[in-house]
Image (cartoon, helix red, strand yellow):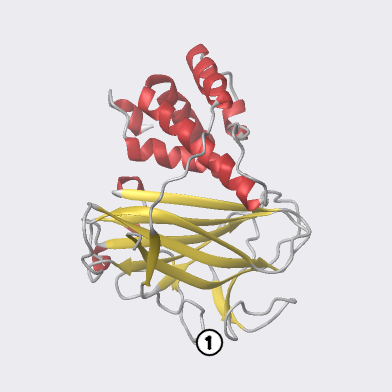
Amino acid sequence: MSELSSNKPNRARWCELIDLHLLGTISKADAIDLEAILASSRDAREDYRQRCNVDAALRQEAAGQAMPTRVTAPKPARWLTWRPLTAAAAGIVFGMFCTSVVFGFVVQRGFERKTPLAVFQPSFEDAQMLLAKGFPDGSAHWGGDEARVVMAENGIQAKEGKFMLRLEASPKGSPRIVYQVLNLTSLPSGSGGEMREIEITASFASADAESAMRFIIRAFAASEAREHLDAAWFDHRDEAIASATRGLDVMPGSKGWQTMGLKIQVPRAARSLVLFFGVRTPDKTLPKAAHYLDDVQVSLIEQQPLP
């Protein structure tokens, strides 16, 4: 709870806590921190309201439904129900936020030009590719939990090419995660503005189509060069200069590949982009099955004016 020792909570910290809450992966200690921050900071409450709206809208979009004119905040993570909220938090967090409104509007932006960025083995076509254990250092490319490149198995064919990355089943039902760090120093200079928009997409599949699961993509923009990022940095990822998270909930009975993506606004000062791909099975009592990742793509998006 170190973030609460200051009179002014750290915005990067509360944004990460809100993202964890929306993904359903927040711990009890972090939930207590989030509750206290929301009770004490108007800016944090506004961020919470906006992220709840975006999360609910994305869920509607993923379900193939039209954008609603009114959405509600997601059900609180179970950690937040373990002890009574203070009167301020109860009235502000779950009163105001659960009645928040999204208004749709159209902006004429021209068209988008996508420039693919170099991703190491985006479709895992090197069958001998080694995966570093844990967060990859400057000499590694992919790193993370136990995983390996495989051909078609368990009724799953590669999304692209002949190979895909298998994330081994977790014996305790905890999330499985793999990482890659991209070097942003060679990006084209572009024109105007202090921010660049980057899109990350990936495809996920599971050997167990009868279980609910959540696929996750996270991105962190760092001011440090790629070779200076290591596991110690990742322990302080809330200090990243920008971050974005997207989760896709897949219901039981969903078969085949699920493709998802997110966009992140990256400051020009960023020298590295840390990509995080994971899968989580909410019901830890179900049999554990392997999950698969393939066709990872990263693109720089530039808005072009209409002719």
What residue would you read off at disc 1? 127
**Amino acid under disc 1:** Ala
Count numbered badges in the picture.
1
In the displayed structure image, the side of residue 196 where residue 294 appears, left or right: right
- Give the residue at x 32% y 59%: 305
Answer with the quarter of the image where residue 229 lies: bottom left
Residue 124 locus on image (x, y percent)? 51, 80
Residue 63 locus on image (x, y percent)? 67, 50
Question: Between residues 19 and 260, which one lies in front from this camera angle?
Answer: 260
Residue 147 locus on image (x, y percent)? 55, 72
Q: Is residue 65 above or below residue 41?
A: below
User: Which image quarter holds the C terminus?
Assistant: bottom left
In the displayed structure image, the side of residue 90 where residue 111 appears, left or right: left
Q: Is residue 221 above or below residue 8?
A: below
- Give the residue at x 51% y 23%: 93
Q: Is residue 127 above or below residue 283?
A: below
| Helix, strand or loop status at disc 1 | loop
- Give the residue at x 28% y 23%: 7
User: Which image quarter holds the N terminus?
Assistant: top left
Q: Is residue 12 visible?
A: yes
Q: Residue furthest top?
A: 87
Residue 227 locus on image (x, y percent)? 25, 68
Answer with the quarter of the image where residue 218 lies: bottom left
